[in-house]
């Protein structure tokens, strides 16, 4: 297991720097962990050795070699009744906790959301490609089943993802009924459908000209069939009953340029789903909350205004 204090401490520091206008009251609840599966998770493969946490460089604070998928729970001091499962990016070969999912989890917690940071399995660690999607479905079912325990409204549970995590969040939102594993415990009676989806610089398409991402290589390989590209591209699965979705991109993103988000937005709107798209002039890739000198640091406020407009999801603010 990794040192939780190291990751959470770094994430909170980044969140504080990026959003000094948010009153960061001391949490009254410790971060806790919930295992997704009893015993060994379903699916083939798996890593050997302990979990790894990235050192200096682009992978700083990122976790990999995950054998026990789980959620970290951030309980707010003043719950607003909403919950968000947060999925960090990292190309499906690591999970960017320190600069993406952990700062977002802390920011959301301080706004009254109960947050579940997802540590999912990775194909690069030897798991079959479907394992991470099974983890996300299972996480949704656990949160919904235990909603009353956490003071959450069961119809106000969303999912948020960055980059590859945006692909994971989007797939979970669009294909919650895709049977990826067999289960029969009490959680399996719950729906895996999120009530809203927040996708930040997401990987959407695995087709040309967007066939260069690490995400694509990790789940369908270097020489996939056209059918595989279609099956794992998010816009393929747009439908009218998709959860309300908000997408954020940066015009100068070299990894997932705005064409990804545009493709999904257009597909959702064409099917009659509720969707919103924001493209910032600059910000690059992997910006997390953004820093105080970046225009993209406006996205949390835009998200909050958007979610407050959602029918039936008006609640009070948190701290």
Image (cartoon, grey):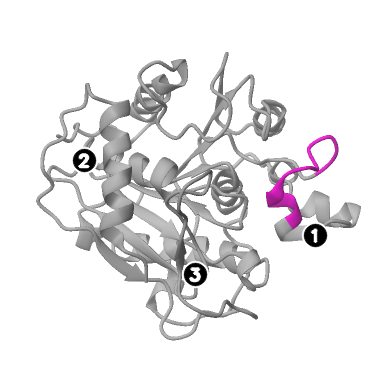
Residue lying furthest front: 56
Q: Nearer the viewer, residue 315 or 98?
A: 98
Q: Of the two numbered discs 1 and 3 on the same chain, state the one appearing first in sequence.
A: 3
Q: Which residue is mark 1?
A: 221
The range drawn in magenta is: 207-217
Front residue of 72/226: it is 72
Asked which secondary structure carries label 3, the reply is loop
Residue at 40%, 27% in the rendered image: 303
Dot 2, crowdedness within 10 Å: few (<14), some or many (≥20)?
A: many
SS label for mark 2: loop
Residue 304 position within the rendered picture, expressed as x and y whole percent measured from the top left? 34, 27
Find residue 76 and report its horizontal and vertical position in percent.
18, 46
CA gap, disc 2 and disc 1: 42 Å
Residue denoted by label 2: 80
User: Residue 136, labelled with which disc?
Assistant: none
Q: Which residue is mark 3?
A: 66
Residue at 13% x, 47% y: name it. 27
């Amino acid at each position: 297991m990794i040192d939780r204090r190291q990751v959470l401490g770094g994430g909170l520091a980044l969140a504080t720097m990026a959003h000094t206008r948010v009153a960061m009251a001391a949490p009254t609840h410790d971060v806790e962990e919930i295992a997704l599966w009893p015993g060994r998770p379903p699916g083939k493969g798996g890593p050997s050795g302990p979990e790894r946490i990235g050192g200096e460089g682009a992978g700083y604070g990122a976790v990999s070699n995950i054998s026990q998928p789980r959620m970290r729970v951030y309980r707010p001091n003043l719950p607003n009744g909403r919950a968000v499962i947060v999925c960090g990016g990292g190309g499906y070969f690591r999970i960017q906790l320190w600069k993406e999912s952990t700062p977002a989890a802390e920011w959301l917690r301080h706004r009254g959301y109960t947050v579940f940071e997802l540590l999912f399995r990775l194909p690069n660690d030897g798991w079959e490609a479907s394992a991470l999607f099974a983890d996300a479905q299972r996480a949704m079912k656990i949160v919904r089943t235990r909603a009353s325990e956490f003071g959450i409204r069961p119809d106000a549970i969303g999912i948020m993802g960055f980059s590859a995590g945006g692909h994971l969040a989007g797939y979970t939102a669009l294909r919650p009924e895709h049977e990826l594993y067999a289960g029969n415990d009490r959680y399996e009676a719950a729906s895996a459908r999120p009530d809203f989806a927040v996708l930040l610089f997401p990987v959407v398409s695995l087709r040309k000209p967007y066939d260069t991402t690490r995400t694509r290589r990790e789940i369908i390989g270097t020489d996939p069939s056209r059918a595989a590209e279609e099956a794992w591209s998010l816009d393929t699965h747009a439908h009218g009953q998709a959860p309300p979705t908000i997408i954020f991109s940066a015009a100068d993103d070299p990894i997932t340029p705005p064409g990804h988000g545009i493709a999904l937005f257009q597909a959702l709107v064409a099917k009659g789903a509720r969707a919103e798209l924001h493209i910032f002039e600059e910000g690059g890739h992997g910006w997390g909350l953004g820093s105080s000198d970046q225009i993209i640091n406006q996205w949390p406020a835009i998200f909050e205004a958007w979610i407050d407009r959602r029918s039936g999801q008006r609640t009070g603010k948190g701290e």
